[in-house]
Image: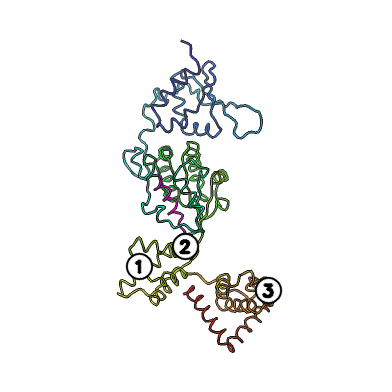
Amino acid sequence: MTITHDSVWRNALKIIQDNVSIQSYKTWFEPIVPVGLTEKVITIQVPSQFFYEWLEEHYVTLLRKTIQRELGEDARLEYRIVIENSNTNSGPYTIEYPNYNTGNSENQESTIPMVIGKNIKNPFIIPGLKKVNIDSQLNRNYNFDNFIEGDCNRLARSAGYAVAQKPAGTAFNPLVIWGGVGLGKTHLAQAVGNEIKKKMPNKTVLYVSSEKFTNQFIDALKNNAVNDFVHFYQLIDVLICDDIQFFANKQKTQDIFFHIFNHLHQSGKQLVLTSDRPPRDLEGMEERLLSRFKWGLSADVQIPDFETRIAILEKKMYSDGIELPREVVEFVAYNINTNIRELEGALISLLAQSSLNKKEIDLDLAKKIIKNFVKSVSREVSIDYIQKTVCEYFDISIEKLKEKTRKRSIVQARQLSMYLAKNYTKNSLKVIGKHFGGRDHSTVIHSCQAVQNLLDTDPEFKDNVDDIQKKIQMNIG
Protein backbone atom coordinates (compact mmCIF):
# COMPACT_ATOMS: atom_id res chain seq x y z
CA MET A 1 0.00 0.00 0.00
CA THR A 2 1.41 3.38 -1.01
CA ILE A 3 2.08 5.77 1.85
CA THR A 4 0.96 9.34 1.09
CA HIS A 5 0.86 12.53 3.10
CA ASP A 6 -2.95 12.20 3.22
CA SER A 7 -2.86 8.66 4.62
CA VAL A 8 -0.15 9.48 7.17
CA TRP A 9 -2.01 12.51 8.42
CA ARG A 10 -5.34 10.70 8.44
CA ASN A 11 -3.87 8.01 10.68
CA ALA A 12 -2.22 10.63 12.85
CA LEU A 13 -5.55 12.40 13.36
CA LYS A 14 -7.14 9.20 14.64
CA ILE A 15 -4.53 9.06 17.40
CA ILE A 16 -4.72 12.80 18.11
CA GLN A 17 -8.50 12.69 18.34
CA ASP A 18 -8.27 10.17 21.17
CA ASN A 19 -5.89 12.37 23.13
CA VAL A 20 -7.41 15.86 23.09
CA SER A 21 -10.82 17.32 23.86
CA ILE A 22 -13.36 17.57 21.05
CA GLN A 23 -13.19 21.37 21.10
CA SER A 24 -9.39 21.40 20.93
CA TYR A 25 -9.43 18.89 18.08
CA LYS A 26 -11.90 20.96 16.06
CA THR A 27 -10.03 24.20 16.72
CA TRP A 28 -6.41 23.17 16.34
CA PHE A 29 -6.28 20.02 14.17
CA GLU A 30 -9.23 20.03 11.77
CA PRO A 31 -7.95 23.19 9.96
CA ILE A 32 -4.56 21.57 9.26
CA VAL A 33 -4.01 20.43 5.65
CA PRO A 34 -1.30 17.86 4.77
CA VAL A 35 0.52 19.06 1.65
CA GLY A 36 3.57 16.85 1.17
CA LEU A 37 5.63 13.83 2.17
CA THR A 38 9.30 13.41 1.27
CA GLU A 39 10.96 10.32 2.74
CA LYS A 40 10.24 10.81 6.45
CA VAL A 41 9.40 14.50 6.37
CA ILE A 42 5.68 15.37 6.33
CA THR A 43 4.62 18.93 5.54
CA ILE A 44 1.38 20.34 6.92
CA GLN A 45 -0.18 23.72 6.15
CA VAL A 46 -1.57 25.85 9.00
CA PRO A 47 -3.66 29.01 8.57
CA SER A 48 -1.49 31.52 10.45
CA GLN A 49 1.72 32.24 12.34
CA PHE A 50 -0.25 32.31 15.58
CA PHE A 51 -1.73 28.91 14.80
CA TYR A 52 1.80 27.51 14.28
CA GLU A 53 3.05 29.05 17.53
CA TRP A 54 0.12 27.65 19.48
CA LEU A 55 0.70 24.12 18.17
CA GLU A 56 4.39 24.33 19.01
CA GLU A 57 3.67 25.63 22.49
CA HIS A 58 0.86 23.28 23.49
CA TYR A 59 0.88 20.18 21.29
CA VAL A 60 4.51 19.67 20.27
CA THR A 61 4.92 16.43 22.26
CA LEU A 62 1.72 14.92 20.92
CA LEU A 63 2.59 15.83 17.32
CA ARG A 64 6.13 14.49 17.62
CA LYS A 65 5.04 11.15 19.07
CA THR A 66 2.21 10.77 16.57
CA ILE A 67 4.41 11.41 13.51
CA GLN A 68 7.15 9.12 14.84
CA ARG A 69 4.59 6.39 15.36
CA GLU A 70 3.56 6.63 11.71
CA LEU A 71 6.93 7.22 10.04
CA GLY A 72 9.56 6.04 12.52
CA GLU A 73 11.73 7.65 15.17
CA ASP A 74 13.69 9.78 12.71
CA ALA A 75 10.54 11.36 11.26
CA ARG A 76 10.29 15.14 10.98
CA LEU A 77 7.54 17.68 10.56
CA GLU A 78 7.51 20.85 8.48
CA TYR A 79 4.92 23.62 8.58
CA ARG A 80 3.68 25.69 5.69
CA ILE A 81 2.22 28.92 7.08
CA VAL A 82 -0.29 31.02 5.21
CA ILE A 83 0.81 34.65 5.31
CA GLU A 84 -1.60 36.78 7.35
CA ASN A 85 -2.91 40.13 6.14
CA SER A 86 -0.45 40.30 3.28
CA ASN A 87 -0.88 42.69 0.38
CA THR A 88 1.70 40.83 -1.70
CA ASN A 89 1.25 37.84 -3.94
CA SER A 90 3.71 35.75 -1.92
CA GLY A 91 2.53 32.27 -1.10
CA PRO A 92 2.84 30.33 2.15
CA TYR A 93 6.31 29.92 3.64
CA THR A 94 7.74 26.78 5.25
CA ILE A 95 9.29 26.23 8.67
CA GLU A 96 11.08 23.02 9.61
CA TYR A 97 10.86 22.22 13.27
CA PRO A 98 14.49 21.38 14.17
CA ASN A 99 13.92 19.11 17.14
CA TYR A 100 11.64 16.51 15.63
CA ASN A 101 14.56 14.26 14.75
CA THR A 102 15.13 13.25 18.34
CA GLY A 103 17.10 10.05 17.79
CA ASN A 104 16.92 7.17 20.24
CA SER A 105 17.19 9.04 23.54
CA GLU A 106 16.85 6.71 26.47
CA ASN A 107 14.67 9.26 28.26
CA GLN A 108 12.11 9.40 25.44
CA GLU A 109 8.82 7.59 25.96
CA SER A 110 8.30 4.81 23.41
CA THR A 111 4.53 4.98 23.35
CA ILE A 112 1.98 7.75 23.25
CA PRO A 113 0.02 8.19 26.46
CA MET A 114 -3.52 7.45 25.41
CA VAL A 115 -5.27 9.94 27.71
CA ILE A 116 -4.03 13.50 27.21
CA GLY A 117 -6.13 16.52 28.22
CA LYS A 118 -9.11 14.49 29.40
CA ASN A 119 -8.94 15.26 33.13
CA ILE A 120 -8.66 19.03 32.96
CA LYS A 121 -8.61 20.79 36.32
CA ASN A 122 -11.42 23.30 36.74
CA PRO A 123 -10.03 26.48 38.34
CA PHE A 124 -13.47 27.10 39.86
CA ILE A 125 -13.00 23.88 41.84
CA ILE A 126 -15.82 21.81 40.44
CA PRO A 127 -14.75 18.15 40.44
CA GLY A 128 -15.23 15.89 37.43
CA LEU A 129 -15.13 18.47 34.65
CA LYS A 130 -17.90 18.28 32.12
CA LYS A 131 -19.28 21.18 30.13
CA VAL A 132 -22.64 20.90 31.84
CA ASN A 133 -20.91 21.12 35.24
CA ILE A 134 -19.26 24.49 34.62
CA ASP A 135 -21.05 26.96 36.87
CA SER A 136 -21.58 30.25 35.05
CA GLN A 137 -20.72 32.24 38.23
CA LEU A 138 -23.53 34.64 37.25
CA ASN A 139 -25.72 36.57 39.68
CA ARG A 140 -29.29 35.81 38.62
CA ASN A 141 -30.48 39.15 40.00
CA TYR A 142 -28.65 40.91 37.16
CA ASN A 143 -30.96 40.83 34.16
CA PHE A 144 -32.36 43.09 31.46
CA ASP A 145 -35.73 43.40 33.20
CA ASN A 146 -34.31 45.31 36.14
CA PHE A 147 -31.69 47.24 34.17
CA ILE A 148 -33.09 50.75 33.72
CA GLU A 149 -32.41 52.18 30.27
CA GLY A 150 -31.72 55.87 29.77
CA ASP A 151 -29.75 58.19 27.54
CA CYS A 152 -26.73 57.40 29.73
CA ASN A 153 -26.60 53.71 28.74
CA ARG A 154 -28.86 53.18 25.72
CA LEU A 155 -26.13 52.15 23.28
CA ALA A 156 -24.50 49.72 25.71
CA ARG A 157 -27.84 48.20 26.67
CA SER A 158 -28.94 47.79 23.04
CA ALA A 159 -25.62 46.19 22.07
CA GLY A 160 -25.73 43.86 25.06
CA TYR A 161 -29.25 42.75 24.21
CA ALA A 162 -28.26 42.12 20.58
CA VAL A 163 -25.34 39.98 21.73
CA ALA A 164 -27.62 38.04 24.08
CA GLN A 165 -29.97 37.21 21.19
CA LYS A 166 -27.17 36.08 18.90
CA PRO A 167 -23.86 35.47 20.71
CA ALA A 168 -20.87 35.72 18.34
CA GLY A 169 -23.37 36.41 15.56
CA THR A 170 -23.07 40.20 15.57
CA ALA A 171 -20.25 42.63 14.90
CA PHE A 172 -20.07 43.26 18.66
CA ASN A 173 -17.37 40.70 19.44
CA PRO A 174 -15.83 41.57 21.75
CA LEU A 175 -18.38 43.84 23.39
CA VAL A 176 -16.48 46.20 25.70
CA ILE A 177 -18.68 48.00 28.24
CA TRP A 178 -16.85 50.85 29.94
CA GLY A 179 -17.62 53.58 32.44
CA GLY A 180 -17.07 54.79 36.00
CA VAL A 181 -17.64 52.96 39.26
CA GLY A 182 -21.19 51.98 40.16
CA LEU A 183 -22.81 52.81 36.83
CA GLY A 184 -24.07 49.31 35.97
CA LYS A 185 -21.28 47.75 33.86
CA THR A 186 -21.27 44.49 35.81
CA HIS A 187 -25.07 44.39 35.89
CA LEU A 188 -25.29 44.77 32.12
CA ALA A 189 -22.50 42.28 31.36
CA GLN A 190 -24.08 39.65 33.59
CA ALA A 191 -27.52 40.41 32.15
CA VAL A 192 -26.09 39.37 28.77
CA GLY A 193 -24.90 36.09 30.26
CA ASN A 194 -28.17 35.38 32.08
CA GLU A 195 -30.20 36.08 28.94
CA ILE A 196 -28.05 33.69 26.91
CA LYS A 197 -28.38 30.97 29.56
CA LYS A 198 -32.14 31.51 29.56
CA LYS A 199 -32.54 31.26 25.78
CA MET A 200 -29.69 28.83 25.02
CA PRO A 201 -29.18 26.56 28.05
CA ASN A 202 -26.67 24.42 26.14
CA LYS A 203 -24.27 27.37 25.85
CA THR A 204 -21.42 27.39 28.35
CA VAL A 205 -21.37 30.88 29.84
CA LEU A 206 -18.75 32.01 32.36
CA TYR A 207 -18.39 35.23 34.31
CA VAL A 208 -14.99 35.93 35.88
CA SER A 209 -13.41 39.04 37.33
CA SER A 210 -9.96 39.97 36.12
CA GLU A 211 -8.68 39.53 39.66
CA LYS A 212 -9.97 35.97 39.92
CA PHE A 213 -8.62 35.14 36.46
CA THR A 214 -5.18 36.42 37.48
CA ASN A 215 -5.20 34.48 40.76
CA GLN A 216 -6.25 31.29 38.95
CA PHE A 217 -3.42 31.73 36.48
CA ILE A 218 -0.89 32.24 39.29
CA ASP A 219 -2.13 29.02 40.94
CA ALA A 220 -1.81 27.20 37.62
CA LEU A 221 1.78 28.41 37.27
CA LYS A 222 2.62 27.21 40.79
CA ASN A 223 1.09 23.81 40.13
CA ASN A 224 2.50 23.35 36.59
CA ALA A 225 -1.07 23.25 35.31
CA VAL A 226 -1.09 26.10 32.78
CA ASN A 227 -2.25 23.80 29.97
CA ASP A 228 -5.21 22.66 32.08
CA PHE A 229 -6.01 26.29 32.84
CA VAL A 230 -5.99 27.20 29.13
CA HIS A 231 -7.96 24.12 28.13
CA PHE A 232 -10.64 24.93 30.70
CA TYR A 233 -11.19 28.39 29.24
CA GLN A 234 -11.22 26.92 25.73
CA LEU A 235 -14.45 25.13 26.68
CA ILE A 236 -16.34 28.38 27.17
CA ASP A 237 -18.91 29.58 24.63
CA VAL A 238 -19.47 33.03 26.19
CA LEU A 239 -16.70 34.51 28.35
CA ILE A 240 -17.54 37.59 30.43
CA CYS A 241 -14.47 39.19 32.00
CA ASP A 242 -15.00 42.07 34.42
CA ASP A 243 -12.62 45.01 35.03
CA ILE A 244 -9.96 44.20 32.44
CA GLN A 245 -8.07 47.37 33.41
CA PHE A 246 -6.58 45.34 36.27
CA PHE A 247 -4.60 43.28 33.74
CA ALA A 248 -2.36 46.34 33.38
CA ASN A 249 1.39 45.63 33.79
CA LYS A 250 0.74 41.90 34.33
CA GLN A 251 2.62 40.64 31.31
CA LYS A 252 2.19 36.89 31.75
CA THR A 253 -1.50 37.24 32.56
CA GLN A 254 -1.98 39.40 29.47
CA ASP A 255 -0.13 36.84 27.38
CA ILE A 256 -2.31 33.93 28.48
CA PHE A 257 -5.48 36.02 28.12
CA PHE A 258 -4.35 36.98 24.63
CA HIS A 259 -4.11 33.30 23.61
CA ILE A 260 -7.47 32.47 25.20
CA PHE A 261 -9.07 35.50 23.55
CA ASN A 262 -7.70 34.47 20.15
CA HIS A 263 -8.84 30.88 20.52
CA LEU A 264 -12.38 31.81 21.53
CA HIS A 265 -12.73 34.51 18.89
CA GLN A 266 -11.41 32.26 16.10
CA SER A 267 -13.71 29.49 17.30
CA GLY A 268 -16.78 31.67 16.96
CA LYS A 269 -17.27 32.28 20.67
CA GLN A 270 -18.53 35.49 22.28
CA LEU A 271 -16.48 37.76 24.55
CA VAL A 272 -17.94 40.47 26.80
CA LEU A 273 -15.50 42.70 28.67
CA THR A 274 -15.91 45.57 31.11
CA SER A 275 -13.48 48.35 31.92
CA ASP A 276 -13.38 51.67 33.76
CA ARG A 277 -12.13 53.39 30.57
CA PRO A 278 -12.25 52.85 26.80
CA PRO A 279 -9.64 50.48 25.28
CA ARG A 280 -7.71 53.38 23.74
CA ASP A 281 -7.04 54.78 27.23
CA LEU A 282 -5.95 51.54 28.91
CA GLU A 283 -2.36 51.82 30.07
CA GLY A 284 0.12 49.05 30.80
CA MET A 285 -1.43 46.78 28.15
CA GLU A 286 0.28 44.98 25.27
CA GLU A 287 -0.56 46.57 21.93
CA ARG A 288 -1.61 43.23 20.41
CA LEU A 289 -4.17 42.80 23.20
CA LEU A 290 -5.46 46.36 22.88
CA SER A 291 -5.92 45.87 19.15
CA ARG A 292 -8.16 42.89 19.81
CA PHE A 293 -10.23 44.79 22.36
CA LYS A 294 -10.96 47.25 19.53
CA TRP A 295 -12.19 44.57 17.12
CA GLY A 296 -15.82 44.78 18.22
CA LEU A 297 -17.79 47.56 19.89
CA SER A 298 -16.85 49.78 22.84
CA ALA A 299 -19.99 51.19 24.47
CA ASP A 300 -19.96 53.47 27.50
CA VAL A 301 -22.31 53.82 30.44
CA GLN A 302 -22.45 57.34 31.89
CA ILE A 303 -23.75 58.95 35.05
CA PRO A 304 -27.57 58.72 34.89
CA ASP A 305 -29.54 61.93 34.50
CA PHE A 306 -32.18 63.06 36.99
CA GLU A 307 -35.09 61.30 35.26
CA THR A 308 -33.17 58.04 34.99
CA ARG A 309 -32.21 58.23 38.67
CA ILE A 310 -35.88 58.58 39.59
CA ALA A 311 -36.75 55.58 37.39
CA ILE A 312 -34.01 53.52 39.09
CA LEU A 313 -35.37 54.37 42.55
CA GLU A 314 -38.95 53.60 41.52
CA LYS A 315 -37.91 50.24 40.06
CA LYS A 316 -36.04 49.39 43.26
CA MET A 317 -39.03 50.43 45.37
CA TYR A 318 -41.41 48.36 43.25
CA SER A 319 -39.25 45.24 43.41
CA ASP A 320 -38.93 45.58 47.22
CA GLY A 321 -42.60 46.44 47.76
CA ILE A 322 -41.86 49.93 49.11
CA GLU A 323 -43.82 53.16 48.73
CA LEU A 324 -42.28 56.59 49.30
CA PRO A 325 -43.66 60.10 48.86
CA ARG A 326 -42.84 61.57 45.47
CA GLU A 327 -41.04 64.54 47.03
CA VAL A 328 -38.73 62.17 48.92
CA VAL A 329 -37.88 60.23 45.77
CA GLU A 330 -37.09 63.43 43.91
CA PHE A 331 -34.99 64.72 46.80
CA VAL A 332 -32.88 61.55 46.90
CA ALA A 333 -32.51 61.49 43.11
CA TYR A 334 -31.47 65.13 43.01
CA ASN A 335 -28.85 64.91 45.76
CA ILE A 336 -27.33 61.49 45.02
CA ASN A 337 -26.05 62.06 41.50
CA THR A 338 -22.70 60.27 41.39
CA ASN A 339 -23.57 56.66 40.61
CA ILE A 340 -26.28 54.03 40.86
CA ARG A 341 -24.61 52.11 43.68
CA GLU A 342 -24.67 55.16 45.97
CA LEU A 343 -28.22 55.95 44.91
CA GLU A 344 -29.48 52.52 45.99
CA GLY A 345 -27.32 52.69 49.11
CA ALA A 346 -28.95 55.97 50.09
CA LEU A 347 -32.40 54.41 49.70
CA ILE A 348 -31.41 51.44 51.89
CA SER A 349 -29.99 53.79 54.52
CA LEU A 350 -33.21 55.80 54.54
CA LEU A 351 -35.37 52.69 54.96
CA ALA A 352 -33.14 51.34 57.72
CA GLN A 353 -33.30 54.58 59.73
CA SER A 354 -37.06 54.71 59.33
CA SER A 355 -37.43 51.14 60.59
CA LEU A 356 -35.04 51.52 63.53
CA ASN A 357 -36.46 54.83 64.70
CA LYS A 358 -40.06 53.90 63.86
CA LYS A 359 -40.60 57.10 61.93
CA GLU A 360 -42.54 57.77 58.78
CA ILE A 361 -40.35 58.60 55.81
CA ASP A 362 -40.96 62.24 55.00
CA LEU A 363 -38.89 65.01 53.49
CA ASP A 364 -37.43 66.12 56.82
CA LEU A 365 -36.16 62.63 57.61
CA ALA A 366 -34.82 62.27 54.07
CA LYS A 367 -32.90 65.55 54.39
CA LYS A 368 -31.36 64.45 57.68
CA ILE A 369 -30.38 60.98 56.51
CA ILE A 370 -29.24 61.89 53.01
CA LYS A 371 -27.18 64.78 54.36
CA ASN A 372 -25.24 62.39 56.58
CA PHE A 373 -24.94 59.84 53.78
CA VAL A 374 -23.69 62.34 51.22
CA LYS A 375 -21.21 63.71 53.74
CA SER A 376 -19.63 60.29 54.09
CA VAL A 377 -19.10 59.78 50.37
CA SER A 378 -18.81 63.24 48.81
CA ARG A 379 -15.67 64.98 47.68
CA GLU A 380 -14.73 68.65 47.87
CA VAL A 381 -17.14 70.72 45.82
CA SER A 382 -15.72 71.80 42.48
CA ILE A 383 -15.91 75.07 40.55
CA ASP A 384 -17.74 73.19 37.79
CA TYR A 385 -20.39 72.05 40.27
CA ILE A 386 -20.84 75.60 41.58
CA GLN A 387 -21.25 76.92 38.04
CA LYS A 388 -23.76 74.18 37.25
CA THR A 389 -25.78 74.89 40.41
CA VAL A 390 -25.90 78.65 39.85
CA CYS A 391 -26.79 78.27 36.16
CA GLU A 392 -29.60 75.80 36.92
CA TYR A 393 -30.99 78.17 39.58
CA PHE A 394 -31.04 81.19 37.26
CA ASP A 395 -31.86 79.11 34.14
CA ILE A 396 -28.88 80.17 32.05
CA SER A 397 -26.25 78.12 30.24
CA ILE A 398 -22.69 77.67 31.52
CA GLU A 399 -21.44 78.91 28.14
CA LYS A 400 -23.26 82.22 28.71
CA LEU A 401 -21.61 82.48 32.13
CA LYS A 402 -18.17 82.48 30.48
CA GLU A 403 -18.97 84.87 27.64
CA LYS A 404 -17.99 88.57 27.53
CA THR A 405 -21.34 90.24 28.05
CA ARG A 406 -22.67 93.15 30.11
CA LYS A 407 -26.18 91.72 30.45
CA ARG A 408 -27.03 92.27 34.11
CA SER A 409 -28.51 88.84 34.89
CA ILE A 410 -25.51 86.99 33.45
CA VAL A 411 -22.94 89.32 35.04
CA GLN A 412 -24.62 88.84 38.42
CA ALA A 413 -24.69 85.04 38.04
CA ARG A 414 -21.01 85.03 37.05
CA GLN A 415 -20.02 87.21 39.98
CA LEU A 416 -21.97 85.04 42.39
CA SER A 417 -20.33 81.88 41.00
CA MET A 418 -16.89 83.42 41.57
CA TYR A 419 -17.89 84.45 45.10
CA LEU A 420 -19.06 80.93 45.94
CA ALA A 421 -15.99 79.35 44.31
CA LYS A 422 -13.77 81.48 46.55
CA ASN A 423 -15.73 80.50 49.66
CA TYR A 424 -16.24 76.78 48.97
CA THR A 425 -13.07 75.70 47.18
CA LYS A 426 -9.36 75.92 47.88
CA ASN A 427 -8.54 77.22 44.41
CA SER A 428 -6.51 80.39 43.94
CA LEU A 429 -8.07 83.52 42.48
CA LYS A 430 -6.09 82.92 39.31
CA VAL A 431 -7.48 79.39 38.90
CA ILE A 432 -11.02 80.59 39.59
CA GLY A 433 -10.65 83.28 36.94
CA LYS A 434 -9.52 80.70 34.36
CA HIS A 435 -12.78 78.78 34.86
CA PHE A 436 -14.74 81.86 33.83
CA GLY A 437 -13.43 82.48 30.35
CA GLY A 438 -9.83 83.20 31.33
CA ARG A 439 -10.50 86.23 33.53
CA ASP A 440 -7.73 87.50 35.83
CA HIS A 441 -7.57 87.53 39.64
CA SER A 442 -8.53 91.23 39.88
CA THR A 443 -11.87 90.44 38.20
CA VAL A 444 -12.52 87.73 40.81
CA ILE A 445 -11.76 90.19 43.64
CA HIS A 446 -14.11 92.78 42.14
CA SER A 447 -16.87 90.16 41.71
CA CYS A 448 -16.60 89.02 45.33
CA GLN A 449 -16.89 92.63 46.54
CA ALA A 450 -19.91 93.25 44.30
CA VAL A 451 -21.70 90.16 45.64
CA GLN A 452 -20.97 91.13 49.24
CA ASN A 453 -22.42 94.60 48.63
CA LEU A 454 -25.61 93.06 47.19
CA LEU A 455 -25.92 90.70 50.14
CA ASP A 456 -25.82 93.68 52.48
CA THR A 457 -28.36 95.76 50.55
CA ASP A 458 -30.69 93.45 48.55
CA PRO A 459 -32.87 91.02 50.63
CA GLU A 460 -34.22 89.22 47.53
CA PHE A 461 -30.71 88.60 46.24
CA LYS A 462 -29.68 87.36 49.70
CA ASP A 463 -32.58 84.86 49.70
CA ASN A 464 -31.46 83.57 46.28
CA VAL A 465 -27.89 83.15 47.52
CA ASP A 466 -29.12 81.33 50.65
CA ASP A 467 -31.05 78.85 48.49
CA ILE A 468 -28.03 78.17 46.28
CA GLN A 469 -25.73 77.77 49.29
CA LYS A 470 -28.10 75.21 50.78
CA LYS A 471 -27.82 73.13 47.61
CA ILE A 472 -24.03 73.37 47.67
CA GLN A 473 -23.85 72.54 51.39
CA MET A 474 -26.08 69.55 50.83
CA ASN A 475 -23.57 68.27 48.28
CA ILE A 476 -20.59 68.63 50.62
CA GLY A 477 -22.43 67.66 53.79
Q: Tell me where the magenta segment starts and ends, as one range.
A: 181-197
**Mark 3, residue position:** 439
Q: Which tag, 1 or 3, sits closer to the chain's start?
A: 1
Q: Is residue 173 above or below residue 383?
A: above
Q: Which amino acid is tagged 1?
A: Glu
> Where's residue 182, x and y in %?
45, 60
In the rendered image, which quarter is residue 288 located in?
top right
Indicate which disc residue 308 carries: 2
**Mark 1, residue position:** 323
Q: Which amino acid is tagged 2?
A: Thr
Classed neighbour count for the residue bearing mark 3: other residues with Cα under 10 Å, few (<14), some (14–19), many (≥20): some
Residue sitting farthest toward the bottom? 457
Residue sitting farthest toward the front? 326
Query: Gap in Å between the C-alphas at discs 1 and 3?
Result: 49 Å
Q: Which amino acid is tagged 3?
A: Arg
Q: Does residue 192 show up magenta in the picture?
A: yes
